[in-house]
Image (cartoon, coloured by chain):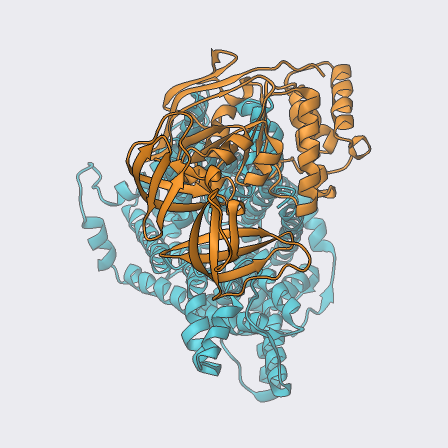
Chain colours: A orange, B cyan
Amino acid sequence: MHLNKVSLEARGISLAYGSTEVLKNLDLKIEPGEFFALLGPSGSGKSTLLRLIAGFNQHQKGELLIDGKDITGTPPHLRNVGMVFQNYALWPHMSVWDNVAFGLVERREARDAIKRKVGEALALVGLQQFAQRRPSQLSGGQQQRVALARTIVIEPKLLLLDEPLSNLDKNLRVQMRDELKNLQRTLGLTTIFVTHDQEEAMTTADRMAVLDKGVLQQVGKAVELFDFPANRFVAGFVGTANLLEGQVRQVSAGGVDFDATGVGRLVLPAAAGQAPQAGPATLAFRPHSVDIRPRDAHVDALRNWLDGHVVSSEFLGETSRYRVKVGEALIVANQRHYAGRSLFQPGEEVRLGIESSQLRLLVQ
Amino acid sequence: MGWGPWLLAGVVLAFLGLFLLVPVGLVIYTAFVTETGAPTLGHFANFFGQALLLESFWNSLYVALASVFFASLIAIPLAYLTVRFEFRGALLIQTLGVLPLIMPPFVGAVALQLIFGRSGSVNLLLNDWFGFTVPIMDGLVGVTFVESIHYFPFILLNLVAAMRNIDGAMEESAMNLGAKGWRLFWRVIFPLSLPGYLAGAALVFVKVFDDLGTPLVMGVTNMLAPQAYLRITSVGIEDPLGYVISVIMIVFSLLALWMAARMMKGKDYSTLQKGGNSLQRRQLRGWESVLAYGWVVFVLLVTLAPHIGILLMSFARVWSFSVLPDSYTLAHYATVFTDARLMIYNTLKYCLLAAGLDVLLGTAIAYLIYRTQLPARQWLDYLASIALAIPGLVLAIGYLRMFKGVNLPFTDTPVVTTWVLIMIAYAVRRLPYALRSCMAALQQVHISLEEAANSLGAGQIGTARRIMVPLMMGGILAGFVTSFITAAVELSATILLTSSQSQAPMSYGIYLFMQSIAGRGPGAALGVIAVAVVALGTYLSHRVIERSREPVRVATA
């Protein structure tokens, strides 16, 4: 199978249904051969963007370029962009073989070529022996593979996957995730997939874009988004985060002074890049960078220490998760667990140590 | 969106305009103008000034309302029994729901005459045993009796569907809050099933009010439809009173359907949730069981009477003033197959063509409504559905008026003498049913199935041909069969549009045979054949619907 690697670029794309804006002035560039995730909650516009690339939706403003050529206005059947639907959309009145051959028949390819290509595609997803079955006789995972084979057999420029794993049960999901990844690596096909599951996006994609309310929030590698979220939404959506509202009081060479509303003062190390302005801001940090200790424990200067009391505790196995009331805020702290470690009880007075280097100041 | 949808919509609109809107509009127009074309209400004054016509009007109204009443009396207990109780007879009731529908009422009327008539089997027996008779087949009472028996399934089927859709939790929460027994039924179950009941009742009213064949066959002429027919056939197509009657019939049909729609507006009570339970069923107690079976068997016997009657009649050498025929023969069938072979052929020809036309139009309209963004596309559905309120008689009058003096292009044959008009009348009148079927079928096809084809390189036409239509096929076939079987027994348009013996279909043949005593045997034989055709069609469409229900969905759903 011979596939060209293409790039996709969106320039200032806007789409509205009547007065409802679904996508707002969106700029995005996806590199050739990339496995790219569109991540966002439902209603964020991620599926709309995918359908727009496939040609089922039309944007009112902006340009959509494949390898530098604007495809705005090209009808779906002339785009050569393959899409795997969330419900797979396998045709129940055709056999697996006919499903996969469909696109080739539409392209009026020679009988031999169709036979060879369909065979290859089915072999690629390991379903040669199921060619004569009806889709309804296959399991969910097998249907997913047929849908994939049906799409890649036409050697599309782009592969679009709409929530590809959401219809599978949990174990199968992990297995299919790996298969998808391997397949994409083998083919080197530029692939865009939509998901609302941040874990799925982080484990599968090379890079991802986070969308909310039709606006692109941040684009980058999983680790970048996790470690340096651009705003409150990304911090909360990619992983869990504690968010403290407050004011930047003072910025000096020694560090940044942050006054968290209803909690107290915290000190951040001086930022390497641009220094933050004094004014309202949000402080974000992950639960696992919070150390939880008894109230009378000795403390060091590497952390910001806050006193509070435990509101609730959950034992998750590898970690214990505590919700701790500090002033007016509720802070989530994860503690690594090992056999013999005793758990804090609700109501217990504790001291929280937040690693200063893990504090992130969000101005938006 | 290209020009394709516009062209398609144009063709559909042209058809509906030419064969539904213009003829009906012409009928209404003619009722309100003088011979010189000046507007007038004089024809209506004339109508209400004639004692016979006024009487006919009240009679029609009386028969229609009484039929709704008696049909409800039969149907409501049956519906309640099936939904509410663990009842072995449920299958019997289902059969009951179909049996009357497979026999055209005007055929049933003749058979019922022989069984319940003044000198029919039942009255002969009653007279022998008890010395009295029940004149149930005479005059308006007789028409009401025949119509109630024939049309109660409309109420039964709609009511059962509505009651089945009530979520069991509705009843349980009412019980939880202290309601039970009669009050529970009256305050919760009845109001929730009311929309279904009204839909059925309105349909019964319209069908009875517009029916021409039954009163005609029973010799009752002082009703609206027979009066219109008699005036047009005896006085002529110019007689304004025929048009006045047509307008009154349209108005009352529209009124009934509109009232039902209005009362149901915003009351979609199909509250059944996914995975929810239907109403609780309970066992019948001993005496309840006796009552229930008693009622079901009684209704079944009465409902079966026309079928048995027509069957006996078709084999009877002589059957008059006796409980059962005196001797039997196959001669009537022989007569039918020699004399009426052309009629059977004509019925098949007209009905297959009409049903084909219906599903073509139905599929096209469904496609335009669900798969395109044409402005005001919903109106195609509304326009086609107008046919529901137009009696066949009125449509036929409209055609006769519209094509009066018009010859087929390049020939001397007047349009009104061609069989094509009969076929088109069938198609127009059955279009709403086929359309429902096609629309339901397309609604079940998930749009992603077509989008997938589209993104794999199939254009609009390719997607429709290879994906949409094959997936709709179950619904299309069901629509086809429904159109076919109902057209096969249509009489009211047929009777006016049939201009020569050679183009008469079976329904007209039955009517013609039944006019003379000697023709009753062959008429009955032809009736049996018609019933067999319709029964087979009904069975087939049920099978098709059952089979198509599952795989049309997206495979994973």
Residue most extreme to the top: A68
The image shows residue A293, relative to residue B22, as above or below, that is: below
Residue B168 vs residue B545, the one in the foreground:
B168
Left or right: B374 as drawn, with respect to A109: left
Residue B448 vs residue A322, the one in the foreground:
A322
Residue A208 vs residue B469, the one in the foreground:
A208
- Residue drawn 58% across the image and 77% down it: B295
The image shows residue B555, relative to residue B202, as above or below, that is: above
Residue most extreme to the right: A129
Residue B350 seen anywhere in this rendered image of the structure: yes
Residue B92 vs residue B218, the one in the foreground:
B92
Left or right: B23 as drawn, with respect to B312: left
- Residue drawn 48% across the image and 49% down it: A353
The image quarter in which residue A362 lies = top left
Q: How many marks?
A: 0
Question: Where does residue A246 sit, x and y in percent of width and height?
Answer: 32, 44
Question: Where does residue B86 sit, x and y in percent of width and height?
Answer: 63, 74
Quadrant position of the N terminus of chain A in the picture: top right
Question: Where does residue B33 sit, x and y in percent of width and height?
Answer: 21, 41
Residue B399 seen anywhere in this rendered image of the structure: no
